[in-house]
Amino acid sequence: MTTDASGAGKVEAAWQDLLDSDRVSAELVVAAYAEPRLRQLFPWVGMWELHFSRCTEQRWTWDVPYIGPTAAGPGHAGPYYVEGPSRTQKIGRADTAQEAIAMVVERLPSNCGPAFHGTPEELAVYESGGNL
């Protein structure tokens, strides 16, 4: 399990699925996909929120802020809230998808690179220099 091409392929496939989905605001997905630092992370959706994982396998990581609509409804569009990485950490409100994306990008973990092909546990071992 590494940050190899198979991980990149899984990340791109997940983005393509989201771009063709209505589970989260299309405006938000397009804006996130346009940001290279987020496009390299594994995207996933829960409760109309757009999350970003540093690994490709479940349980995904919870160390990157996420974005949700302030009101559920058609298209689940903005304004948006930005929270995280945990559900108890409120970052703020954004009127546009671009503002929400900027709030996430400025709070990315320092070790945030291309998504790791594996689980959070395998990522932790990899980052500690251990063998898988």
Image (cartoon, grey):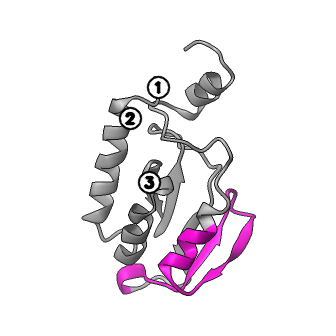
Q: Amino acid at mark 2?
A: Gly
Above or below residue 99? Residue 38 is: above
| Viewer-nearest of discs 3 and 1 | 1
Q: Earlier in the sequence, mark 3 or mark 2?
A: 2
Q: Position of residue 32 (x, y in %)?
A: 44, 65
Q: Going by the image, does 23 lie left or right of 106?
A: left
* Residue at image location 56% in from the left, 74% down from the top: 100
Marks 3 and 2 sit apart, C-alpha to C-alpha, by 12 Å
Residues shaded magenta: 74-103
Mark 1 lies on a secondary structure that is loop
- Residue 2 image label: 1
Residue 89 vs residue 37, the one in the foreground:
37
* Residue at image location 65% in from the left, 49% down from the top: 63
Above or below residue 92? Residue 105 is: above
Marks 3 and 1 sit apart, C-alpha to C-alpha, by 18 Å
Marks 2 and 1 sit apart, C-alpha to C-alpha, by 7 Å
Q: Residue furthest left?
A: 20
Label 2 CA crowd tier, 10 Å (few <14, some 14–19, many 20+)? many
The C terminus lies in which quarter of the figure?
top right
Q: Position of residue 47 (x, y in %)?
A: 49, 67
Label 3 CA crowd tier, 10 Å (few <14, some 14–19, many 20+)? many
Q: Name the residue that disc number 2 marks.
A: 7
Tag 2–tag 1 contact (CB < 8 Å): yes
Q: Is residue 79 magenta?
A: yes
Q: Can the viewer see residue 40?
A: yes
Q: Going by the image, does 8 lie left or right of 87?
A: left
Q: Amino acid at mark 1?
A: Thr
Q: Going by the image, does 61 lie left or right of 85?
A: left
Q: Can the viewer see residue 47?
A: no
